[in-house]
Image (tube, helix red, strand yellow):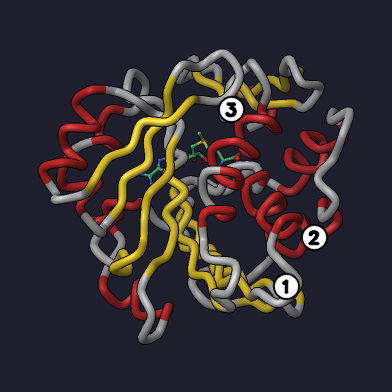
Amino acid sequence: MLNQIEFLKTRDGSSTIYLKHLDETYHSINGAFSESLHVYIINGLKKIDKEQEQINILEVGFGTGLNALLTMDYVLPHQKVNYMSIEPFPLEIDIINKYYKEFSHLPYNTPFISHLIQSEFNKWNIIHDQFSFCLINKKLQELSDSDYQLFGENGVDIIYYDAFAPAKQSEMWDLEVIEKATQALNPNGFLTTYCAQGQFKRNLKSLGLRLESVKGPLGKREMTLAFKNL
Ligand SMILES: C[S@@+](CC[C@H](N)C(=O)[O-])C[C@H]1O[C@@H](n2cnc3c(N)ncnc32)[C@H](O)[C@@H]1O
């Protein structure tokens, strides 16, 4: 795998991974850390009511685990997170370790990355008091009702939709795939993503979701939020 990837320094001092065969990076080259913070924490986790004690998160594309680590960093002390991430192609531990070595400023919880990577697939792993983690080792397209049932009675509060860009992996932004990702959203649930592509937004609307376009991360005019409640 190492010969298929490169580590790139992004403009905020954090790194990203470049996949040669896809000609695509895991994060924005304008700042991996700042993109993750802006799209998934400030416009995701931080939009949840502070009084809500249990938060169910579904991530599409675990990749380097950066969104999971920042979620651990920013969850409030009285809150607990069930974090389910879908990843059919998990990165090897050596690659992940090398990736975080390149950062000028690491997430506070980076030491937990090895627990996340080495956790058992397709079941809940208690990473610490406030954070349970389930890595679903399959494609989003293959996700089944029984995977969603791992959340128990409760549905999904936030979807971190972090697939490769439509120009590189268009099928991830198709109507049926988005429908699969959003089918278990709670009445107050929402999806957040860096993507602001027109067809993707029309797909979200046709599923009955209410869209909000907000300012994007560094170097990007817009990003998208899609809410279940109208
Ligand atoms: C933009 S990168 C993810 C970035 C990741 N959240 C991070 O912070 O590193 C997209 C991820 O989606 C994964 N992926 C590719 N095909 C997928 C599929 N069909 N279903 C779910 N994830 C997929 C890739 O392996 C990759 O890890």
Quarter holding residue 64: top right
Residue 74: which numbered mark, if any?
Answer: none
User: Is 212 located above or below residue 27 in the figure?
Assistant: below
Q: Amino acid at mark 1?
A: Ile
Residue toward you, 113 or 21: 113
Q: Earlier in the sequence, mark 3 or mark 1?
A: 3
Find residue 21 and report its horizontal and vertical position in percent. Answer: 48, 19
Q: Which residue is mark 3?
A: 27
**Residue at (82% x, 55% y) in the render:** 109
Density class for disc 2 (Cα within 10 Å; few <14, some 14-19, many ≥20) is some
Q: Amino acid at mark 3?
A: His
Tell me the element at label 3: loop
Find residue 130 and report its horizontal and vertical position in percent. Answer: 71, 75
Q: CA distance from mark 3 to mark 1?
A: 25 Å
Q: State if disc 2 and disc 3 touch (CB < 8 Å).
A: no
**Residue at (46% x, 40% y) in the render:** 162
Label 3 within 8 A of ligand 1 by Cβ: yes
Q: Quadrant of the C terminus?
A: bottom left
**Residue at (33% x, 18% y) in the render:** 167
Q: Quadrant of the N terminus?
A: top right
Q: Which residue is mark 1?
A: 127
Q: Earlier in the sequence, mark 2 or mark 1?
A: 2
Q: Which residue is mark 2?
A: 112
> In the rendered view, does 84 fall on the left or right side of 105?
left
> In the rendered view, does 81 fall on the left or right side of 12?
left
Find residue 25 and report its horizontal and vertical position in percent. Answer: 56, 22
Density class for disc 3 (Cα within 10 Å; few <14, some 14-19, many ≥20) is many
Find residue 166 and report its horizontal and vertical position in percent. Answer: 32, 25
